[in-house]
Image (cartoon, coloured by chain):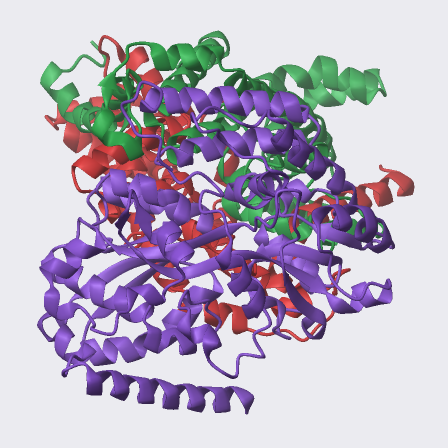
Amino acid sequence: MKILRNLLGTVAITGILATGAMADNHGWSLKKAAEPYAGTTIDVVFLLRPGYEAIEAMLPAFEEETGIKVNIIKHPYENALGEQVRDFVAGGDLDIALIDLVWIGNFAENDWIIPLADVQAKFPDAVDPDLDIDDFFPLVLNAFGGWNDTLYGLPFDNYSGLMFYNRCILEEAGFDGPPETWQQLKDEYGPALTKDGKYAFALQSKRNETQSADSFARMLWPFGGSFLDADFKSNLNSDESQTGLKFRQDLMQYMPDGIVAYDHAETVNAFSQGDVAMITEWSAFYSSVVSPDTSKVADCVEIAPEPTGPAGRKPALGGFSLAVAAQADEAEQAAAYLFIQWATSKANAREYLERGGVPARQSVYKEDGLEDYKFVPALVESWQEGVPEFRPRFAEWPEITEIVQEWGTKMMLGEVTTEEGAQEIGTRMEEVLEAAGYYSGEKPLAQ
Amino acid sequence: MTSPRSFWSQIALLALIILVCVFPFYWMVTTSLKTQIVALEAPPVWVFEPTLDNYREALFEDDVLRTLINSIVIAICTTALALLLGVPAAFALARFEFRGKKDLWFWFITNRMVSPIVLALPFFLIARNLGLLDKHITLILIYLTFNLPIVIWIVTDQFRGIPYDLDEAARLEGASQFTIMRKICLPLAMPGVAVSAIFSFIFSWNELMFGLILTRNEAKTAPAMAVSFMEGYNLPYGKIMATSTLIVIPVLIFALIASKQLVRGLTMGAVK
Amino acid sequence: MRGQVPRRTIFAFIGPAVLGLAMVGIAPLLYAVWTSLHFYNLTKLKRVEFIGADNYLTVLTDEVFWQAMGRTFFLLGTALPLQIALGLGIALVLHQPGLTLVKTLARLSLVLPMATTYAVVGLLGQVMFNQKFGVVNQLLGGVDVNWIGDPNNAFAMIIFWDVWQWTPFVALVLLAGLTMVPGEVEEAARLETKSTWTILRYVQLPFLLPGLVAVLILRTADTLKLFDMVFTLTRGGPGSSTEFISLMIQRVGFRGFDQGLASAQAIILLIITIVLAQIYIRVFHKEV
């Protein structure tokens, strides 16, 4: 019943917004803009995550309206980069690039994607007068969609790291709120909540992008550390970086065994089963932990921003933008643009949110009736002060992340000390950057 | 002849062997009939209300059906091609004398030993240059690298077992080598050809790495599909096991049919 | 003379197969040699350049590569003896007279593991070895062993599945060898001694040797190729604890996109494989 009411409400809202948009925008309508491209099929890679299911559920309306067919190829995150790179180097079928923020340097430098302005100039009639670029959170827009001051993609599946905590477990142990700082989490919450086979915290650390993004980088920034210094040399052996990495080692005693084999699914699952009291996870997983179908603790879930460290609050930042692929032909490019514009539009943001997505539109979070979405305040706060280069975004990231994954996991397993590991990563990372021409001045020190 | 004690210990041992071999399949099938909540029950439950939802979802919503068809098409085509190329070559290796025969035979067989990753990288680049990525024909061709050695090994062996007098007689009557192969030797070698075909089919059906790297959508094979369920915010164990069951059942049926010849084929003539 | 046929006929018979295999087997290798001599990164195709033997030097001095290689042979060295010991035991049990029906059943069930899609074995492993809802811990009496998340346990788990899948193969091969022993020889030996070991060592072993050699060749090759099952089960983790050589090359080539380096690794692996195959086949296998 509740779902039905939501749906009806959504339809009504979209209806109103759509008519409204049509009324003041001199007759621009999606239908009319799409007319020349009806019958075009566009190919795009989607992940197996809530934000994608949300847009997939909304897709029939778009296809109906435009006559454009969207062919979705689903992949797990871990395969998505490889799939797309192989498609782009092969001059394949993809018409839209799905870009994790750390891939954008790579995609842009290879000319696999077209700057947004160029697409708009090419197809002026496709541009929605109500696009309102400034409505996107500036941090998110720049970090997810921009590279070297050029905007390529529009933020689509947007994450900030958030702290998910189990209010019931915390209250039982006498805490009336989540930890404010990482130090508190370790010193107070850790010992109190780790007992009887339950753990205070889980930090997903599997040896893939999860290790470098969710685990390694998450402990670096709040303690003042970073991957690189201003000269693009390794900063991992600095006192601050080492403090962060050692903190992570220390914190492991309050995490489940085998945390290095935990990916998002395992972590979210442990939290949903009530085995872990707190996790720091992407906002995208919200809909999963509050759904009674997948979570035993749905009623106990609360959300806070990530804890702060000595250097302040530096929550993980991640997410995906959609950009038009250069390899697409003219009609496909226009159709792809229309789809991207539609999927990230102001008008659709609310429905996207209600179906489990996380839009990057500021306006939607100012609307009423969002009390049910407990992550909103923490998310909005996190997007005010995130670190865009949380993971360096340059073209060399795919190689560097492999190095970080390998040695970061070795550190956690105690196979090397944090100093040794940092030394290894540093040396290997600098070799990659050297080869790429950053130190000889061939390439600007941009991330 | 045997004492009761050794009789019962024998029974127990045999039962244990059967149990260990079969249990994982039992677990696979039962998990495929569980809902996600039941599948995640800890400790696992043995009695529950079964559901076919996982199969329905896998087959019809997630396109597993299409990938199964792809797998069948690819496996059949590559098997046919391997036989077409391999049987005459096997005949030549068994019947003709020529320089470098040993080396040639060794080269054919060595291909069976090469790690697919050695070929996957360059084959990807070549397929890319020729615009052959994500095409059935690409997998059909690359699967020759392991199918052709199998066919050549087994069938050469089989041809050698056929008495030479038979084709000698035919040759005196003026039959060409091709006629001899087709009319006289091939019918007698049919058991070996059939076994090599079954192997070729099973190996192609089971292949994962090339399927992962060289296909994306159109030509995606069933094992590659099963793997793609493995990351998400929610691992659908029931669906993964349902897909696994669908993949494994045809092979097991094939294997049971050919169980007698299976071992000989796997060792490829090393045991005689 | 027997077997002498015109060159043209030979070519007509064997040419298509040679061409076919050359196309899919040799052409890619030549291409791999070419890429291995270049800086060839899929995400930096604008910067492809000839770098001579640099990639090879990197591989030869890369401890990570040799660790993966060592790990691969360590797996072979632990799993293979287990497979041979268990396989021999099973073969001896099946070889005893009597209980025909149960034995036929057992033989049939032995066929199942080795025909199973390797990727599915890995998926099955994920379900059965899960620390919380896995049936393995339950069957072990409700223990709380973390199989997938602990480096040593994960390695043990890989050994388990390798043994599960390939012991039946060894057993059936050795059983075939046992049935080759002439009945009267075995009978005579049994009159002489009651020791199973003596009979095994002096009567049966000679007939088992060819099978053991075949097992050795194929398991070595298959361990160097091992990818599917580990990829779906642990993806080489936790850490690097189950990253065998084929997984490592796949990671470098398709996750790090450094196809030049990965090609060099692949070619070194190929050389090792060919050398081993040559040794095995030339030494033990007197075919053709």
Identify the hue of chain A.
purple
- Relative to the observer, which residue lies in front, C42 or B185? C42
- Give percent across and percent down for residue A24: 21, 84
- Relative to the observer, which residue lies in front, A261 or B69? A261
- Relative to the observer, which residue lies in front, A276 or C34? A276
- When the figure is inspected, residue A274 is found, relative to residue C188, above or below; the finding is below
- Give percent across and percent down for residue A27: 14, 83
- When the figure is inspected, residue C222 is found, relative to residue B261, above or below; the finding is above
Can residue B110 be spotted in the picture? no
Q: Quadrant of the N terminus of chain B?
A: top right
A106 vs C77, left or right, is left
C122 vs B43, left or right, is left
Q: Quadrant of residue C150?
A: top right
Can residue A137 be spotted in the picture? yes
Q: Which chain is green?
A: C
- Give percent across and percent down for residue A99: 35, 51
- When the figure is inspected, residue B54 is found, relative to residue C21, above or below; the finding is below
A339 vs A45, left or right, is left
- When the figure is inspected, residue B270 is found, relative to residue A1, above or below; the finding is above
- Relative to the observer, which residue lies in front, C123 or B147? C123
Q: Which chain is red?
A: B
- Give percent across and percent down for residue C235: 54, 39
* Label total for image: 0
